[in-house]
Amino acid sequence: MATTSKLVTYDEWLNMPEVSDAIEEVVNGEIRIMPPWKLVHTLVAHALKHILEDQLDRKTFYVLGTQFGLVIRRDPLTSRVPDLAVFRKSNMVVLDGYVHSAPELTVEVLSPGDTRSEREGKLRDYESLGVPEVWVLSPEARTIEVLQFENGKLRTVNVARDGQLHLKQFPDVVVDVASVWPD
């Protein structure tokens, strides 16, 4: 992951050109550029995206994949790029072309190079927004860790290796754990 030495403000960031060939997050004013996803990461994220899109009403919800900015806070600027997020359209707040509101579900797919501190930093940021549910998918372990927001904290409520999962916000949505992993 490449980082910049100069910290950027929200206004400076708004005037920067968009990056098309990499994933860019800003954490406490520091720009972090990550390489594009590897194939397994892509296959897992896309499989889950299609499962969710097939079960959620597209007039009511957006199921967004990577390459959108989720502003956590303006000062110091922190903007994350979740691998997947589900938004209720009526609850979305979009300012300056970026999302400034909590998704109903945020999904992170782990890559072999991800560090524990990077993972924890993202979870703290999602927690600060009050994201009701976060799923952390591990293609290597073939697990889905389900975290739910309770009493101001994200807490692990399940680590699934098989079976079916239901989303907290959408109990009728069913995800077969085995269906998200590539053959």
Image (cartoon, rainbow, N blue to C red):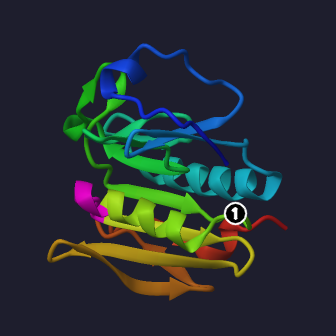
Q: Quadrant of residue 172?
A: bottom left
Q: Nearer the viewer, residue 140 or 32?
A: 32
Q: Which residue is mark 1?
A: 111
Q: Nearer the viewer, residue 5 or 150?
A: 5
Q: Residue at x 25, y 59 (%)?
A: 128
Whole-percent x, y for residue 54 in the image: 52, 49
Q: Quadrant of residue 160?
A: bottom right
Secondary element under disc 1, as helix, strand or loop, is loop
Whole-percent x, y for residue 151 in the image: 14, 77
Whole-percent x, y for residue 33 in the image: 62, 39
For this view, does 18 lie left or right of residue 178?
left
State the quadrant of the C terminus.
Answer: bottom right
* Placement of 43 over or under 147, stated as above or below: above
Q: Residue at x 62, y 38 (%)?
A: 23
Q: Counting other residues with Cα less than 10 Å from the Cα at mark 1, is it few (<14), some (14-19), or many (20 or more)? A: some
* Placement of 183 over or under 159, stated as above or below: above
Q: Indicate whether residue 40 is drawn in magenta.
A: no
- The number of callouts visible is 1
Q: Which residues are magenta?
A: 127-132
Q: Residue at x 44, y 86 (%)?
A: 158
Q: Nearer the viewer, residue 151 or 124?
A: 124
For this view, does 58 lie left or right of residue 90?
right
Whole-percent x, y for residue 175 in the image: 53, 69
For this view, does 131 lie left or right of residue 113?
left
Amino acid type at mark 1: Ser
